Image: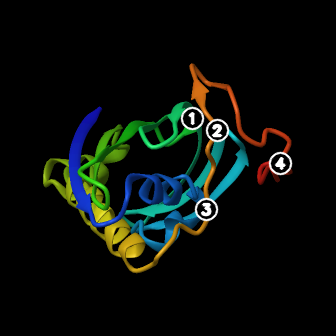
C-alpha cells in the first residue's frame, strides 16, 4: 500500500468545511477522475472513477465519522483503499483539512504512476480544488451531522431513502 499524507488550510469555519465534505456525491466536482460517488446508506458509498485511463469502481464503508472532526473509510470491494480526513479549526473562520490515504496500485502502470508521485500529486490537487470549491460559496451544499463509530451509525437520518446502484 502507498501512504499519502496531505493537508490544506481553508478559509471557512470548520462546520462549513466538514458539512461540505460529507456531501460525497459532490466529489466529482473537485476530484480528478472521479465520475460518480453514490451514497447507498449513511455509511456506505459506491465510487466510479477513471484512474490513469483505467476504469475502477468500488464500495467503501465509513468506519468513523464525528461532526467537525473526522471521516474515515475503507473499501469493501473493488479498488483497495482506505483513508481518514480530519478537520482542525484554526480560529473562527479557518480550518485545516488533513488527508491520510492508503491506496494499493493495481498493475504495472499504476505502480509506475505511484512511484513517480502521480497519486500523491492528484490527492494534493484534489484538496486544492476542494478548497477552491468551498471557499467559492457562502455555505455548504448540505450536511450530515450523524456519527459513526466502528462502522455503526450512532445518529443522523438513518431512514433516508437510498438507491443501491449494484442491485
Q: CA distance from mark 3 to mark 1?
A: 14 Å
- N-terminal-most mark, 3 or 2: 3
Q: Sequence-wise, which precedes: disc 1 or disc 2?
A: 1
In primary-sequence order, the first of circles 1 and 4 is 1
Name the foreground residue: 51 vs 156: 156
Discs 1, 2 touching: Cβ within 8 Å = no
Sequence order check, earlier mark of 2 and 4: 2
Distance from Cα at disc 1 to Cα at disc 2: 12 Å
Query: What residue sits right under mark 4 in the picture?
Result: 160
Q: Distance of mark 2 from mark 4, alpha carbons?
A: 12 Å
Coordinates of residue 46 in the picture (x, y in percent): 64, 49
Whole-percent x, y for residue 100 in the image: 30, 39
Direction from residue 35 to residue 127 in the image, left or right: left
Instruction: Give neighbour class at mark 3: few <14, some 14-19, many 20+ (Cα, 10 Å).
Output: some
Query: Whole-percent x and y of residue 149?
Result: 57, 22
Identify the residue under disc 1.
62
Quadrant of res 44: top right
Q: Nearer the viewer, residue 138 or 162?
A: 138
**Disc 1 versus disc 2: nearer the observer:** 2
| 33 displayed left or right of 26 | left
**Which residue, given by chain and number where applicable, does mark 3 sit on?**
25
Q: Do labels 3 and 4 touch, CB within 8 Å?
A: no
Residue labelled with disc 2: 146
The picture quadrant where one finds residue 24 is bottom right
Task: Describe the colour scheme in one phrase.
Answer: rainbow
Q: What SS does tag 1 mark?
A: strand
Label 1, label 4: how far apart the Cα atoms are: 16 Å
Amino acid at each position: 500500500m502507498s501512504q499519502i499524507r496531505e493537508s490544506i488550510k481553508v478559509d471557512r469555519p470548520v462546520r462549513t468545511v466538514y458539512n461540505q465534505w460529507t456531501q460525497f456525491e459532490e466529489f466529482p466536482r473537485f476530484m480528478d477522475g472521479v465520475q460518480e460517488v453514490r451514497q447507498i446508506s449513511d455509511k456506505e458509498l459506491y465510487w466510479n472513477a477513471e484512474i490513469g485511463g483505467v476504469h475502477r469502481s468500488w464500495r467503501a464503508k465509513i468506519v468513523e465519522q464525528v461532526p467537525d472532526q473526522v471521516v474515515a473509510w475503507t473499501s469493501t470491494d473493488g479498488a483497495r483503499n482506505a483513508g481518514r480526513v480530519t478537520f482542525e479549526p484554526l480560529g473562527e473562520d479557518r480550518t485545516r483539512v488533513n488527508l491520510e490515504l492508503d491506496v494499493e496500485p493495481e498493475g504495472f502502470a499504476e505502480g509506475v504512476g505511484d512511484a513517480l508521485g502521480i497519486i500523491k500529486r492528484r490527492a494534493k490537487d484534489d484538496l486544492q480544488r476542494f478548497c477552491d470549491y468551498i471557499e467559492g460559496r457562502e455555505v455548504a451544499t448540505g450536511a450530515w451531522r450523524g456519527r459513526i463509530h466502528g462502522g455503526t451509525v450512532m445518529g443522523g437520518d438513518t431512514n433516508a431513502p437510498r438507491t443501491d446502484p449494484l442491485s
